[in-house]
Amino acid sequence: MSQDVNSRLTGDFYTAPFGPRLEPDGDTLVLNMGPQHPATHGVLRVVVELDGEYIRRAEPVLGYIHRMHEKMGEVKTWVQYLPNMGRVDYLHALAWNWAYVGAVEKLMGIEVPPRAEYIRVITCELNRINSHLLWWGAYLLDLGAFTPILYAFADREHIMDILQMVTGSRLTYCYYRFGGVSGDVNDEFIRRTREFVADFKKRLPMYRALVTDNIILRGRCEDIGVLTPEMARRYGATGPVLRGSGVAYDVRRAEPYSIYDRLDFDIPTGRKGDVMDRYEVRMAELDQCLRIVEQALDALPTGAHIHPDLPERFIPPKGEVYYAVEGARGKIGVYLLSDGGPKPYRVKLRSPGFSNLSLFAELAQGTLLADAVSILGSLDLVIPEIDR
Amino acid sequence: MSMKRLFQNIKGLWSLLVGLKVTGGELIKPWLTVHYPRQEVENLSSYRGHIELVPATDDPLTPRCIMCWKCVEICPSRCISLRMHATGEAGVAAADDPGLLLAPEVKSPYSAHLAPPPDKIERILDSYRLNYSLCSLCGLCVQICPVDAIRFSRNAYLVGTTRQSFELDLLARLKSQAASARGAAPTQPQGA
């Protein structure tokens, strides 16, 4: 019987991505977890081999939303690549905007006016809150709790209204420009942001009462998917996934860019590295984002929002550059290689989600299928960013 | 041991009751959402809808556009196409084919018109078309326009059932807007 199962699975499309076969020890079931259809986006397919309720192997299948963003960089001019950045990771689009814009600015030596730096920090942190809120809602939806996503979306709506005022868009922002931002903020923006910060501070205890302290959630999160710091480093995990394991690595502190070295904020870390720690790190980051936004609003200088003396055509000198920023999911890196022409010679995008997903196979091994859903959700994956 | 377990169960039950209290409180709060066909959103002052042409200050029927082709060249998805002619000359044929402008820095025969004609010749915009289905609303064209002849419309409720319905003729839009504004203008004093 076991021999039969093995021969049936060998060479199958479903089992082809698996590594060398394990020794059969009875009936196993290969299950396709998660929807996959070209018309849906942001979905992940994981092929799991089950032994009863337990996962023997889990293999994420990637590439369904690959859009050639890196290759597109080679056929568009430097400035024409800007709108692509809002679409790599639609949840924290401004961080990707920043990574690319920052790389080109570093390569060309463009100075960014102080007001633009502060506007970038405010909008990027608001976008981070936005991203964490959607993760929070969607993750709880994965666990079977429907109501929280409605609360998260009510708060997200305020952020999207605020960001729409300056960026003009609600999701796929294309706001940062080489040498600044495309539009200045007005008093209305500052007033509404302050209002939001005050309101949201009052909402956070409600989130805790409704969800974080809930015994059912704790049962599904605590002591599940324990990620050791050593394993996180081995896979190159960054962001809340790494910080949940107790490693206080944040690009904003480790390699400060822009004005983050002048701002006062903490880096929340977990202790055990389980799903609950990753959850708590993100919830604590919401608080820190609010702190950063408040400080940046207080210190917002006057002046130009974009460098006044910019060339009409951006043609960087020959050379290469790497620029990293902290996104909601971890370290976002943009590597650019210029041959001195009107287009980049090579664009390489380092997406944090790819590294964070790659540890899932090892983390899910031997867990219950229901726990694997919880682990997968706790990694905060944005599939378009993984495939790029 | 059993006392500890009992205490934990009571604590867990209490956490559920706290959650119920939160959701119960939301029941009596007012509506936040905008019910679209009956209500519309109002925060569209800086919204990025599809682009539209800005009329000249002295004539609402004429666009401010000086036909410099900068917007056509900078567009990442080549969704703008325009056609012009100069008075006393034949119209420039096939100048509006964006597919042939694969690289803006390469001067193909089709972009030979880029050399600016003498000042005396008056240039007239024949058509200014936007393929909105390709547009990614990055705003580069609005930013690069030297005379601010393009702006974002506030058309947040544009829907269509065919691909052709997103191929917008912006010159016709400008003229129809001017006509409706002129039609509305005389009635306004009468009403007042």
Image (cartoon, coloured by chain):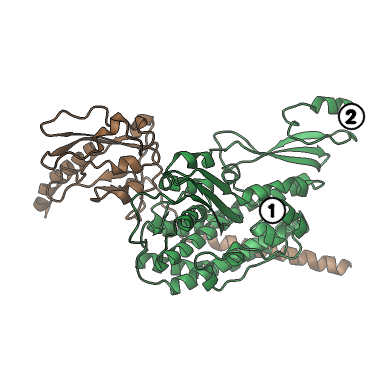
Chain colours: A green, B brown
Q: What chain does mark 1 sit on?
A: A
**Amino acid at dot 2:** Ser
> Viewed as shown, does residue B129 lie left or right of A86?
left
Q: How many marks?
A: 2
Residue drawn at x 72%, y 28% as measured from the top left: A13
Residue A297 appears left or right of B75: right
Residue B63 lies in quadrant = top left
Query: Is B43 on the left or on the right of A198, as rendered?
Result: left
Chain assignment, label 2? A
Q: In which quarter of the image is residue A202?
A: bottom right
Give the vertical position of B83 relative to B26 (above or below).
above
Observer-nearest of A350 and B59: A350
Distance, label 1 to label 2, CA atoms, is 37 Å
Q: Is mark 2 on a helix, strand or loop?
A: helix
Instruction: Give residue A122's position: percent from left, percent from top.
Output: 47, 64
Viewer-closest of B130 and B172: B130
Res A63 label: none
User: What percent of the width, then of the height, locates residue B169?
Assistant: 27, 35
Which residue is under mark 1?
A: A236
- According to the image, label 2 marks what residue? A2
Q: Which amino acid does label 1 sit on?
A: Gly
Please name whichever residue, A193 or A229, is drawn nearer the observer in this view of the structure: A229
Q: With A17 as the anchor, is B127 left or right in this view?
A: left
Mark 1 burial class by Cα count in 10 Å: few <14, some 14-19, many 20+: some
Residue A258, image x and y in percent? Answer: 50, 65
